[in-house]
Image (spheres, helix red, strand yellow):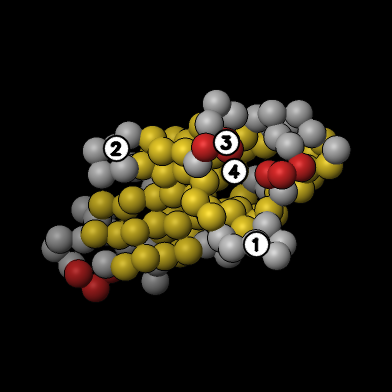
């Protein structure tokens, strides 16, 4: 089955950096995977952090612009999020999301989420 596994989370001090990665598996190479990152802080709703639009351009929520950089390797089925200048407000569980569109085998079409990786930023 389709699986997303995130790694790279951890604890850092404010101003530090982390790199999150997400490895996807379990679907054919001919599928298009629209991958993105979300986060959920305690007591708050899950929010979009970064992803790609239909044209492949990167998108970021306002609060992370200039600090986070998303990248994707379609061949390796991975998406990464380089995070710098971290602040305590970035503390959250970070989730990888993949929306699959598989024209030759629609059984794989769907919206998939990883289990999340914790990022904690201390002041």
- Left or right? Give the position of 103 relative to 77: left
Viewer-closest of 63 and 105: 63
Q: Nearer the viewer, mark 2 or mark 4?
A: 2
Q: Can residue 8 be seen by looking at this rendering? A: yes
The residue located at (26%, 52%) in the rendering is: 32
Q: Which mark is residue 64?
A: 3
Circle 4 is placed at which residue position?
20
State the separation of the CA atoms marked 4 and 3. Answer: 14 Å
Q: Residues within 10 Å of mark 2 (few under 14, many from 20)?
A: few
- Left or right? Give the position of 104 relative to 42: left
Q: Nearer the viewer, mark 2 or mark 3?
A: 3
User: Between disc 4 and disc 1, whose residue precedes?
Assistant: 4
Where disc 4 sits, the SS reads strand
Residue 38 is situated, as x and y percent measured from the top left of the image, at 53, 53
- In contact (CB < 8 Å): disc 2 and disc 4: no
Circle 1 is placed at which residue position?
44
The residue located at (44%, 49%) in the rendering is: 36
């Amino acid at each position: 089955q389709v699986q997303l596994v995130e790694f790279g989370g951890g604890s850092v001090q404010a101003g530090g950096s982390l790199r999150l990665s997400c490895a996807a598996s379990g679907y054919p190479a001919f599928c298009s995977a629209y991958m993105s990152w979300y986060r959920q802080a305690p007591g708050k709703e899950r929010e979009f952090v970064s992803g790609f639009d239909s044209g492949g351009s990167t998108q970021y929520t306002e609060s992370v612009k200039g600090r986070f950089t998303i990248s994707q390797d379609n061949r390796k089925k991975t998406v990464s999020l380089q995070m710098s200048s971290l602040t305590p407000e970035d503390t959250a569980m970070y989730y990888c999301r993949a929306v699959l569109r598989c024209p030759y085998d629609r059984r794989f079409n769907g919206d998939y989420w990883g289990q999340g990786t914790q990022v904690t930023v201390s002041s």
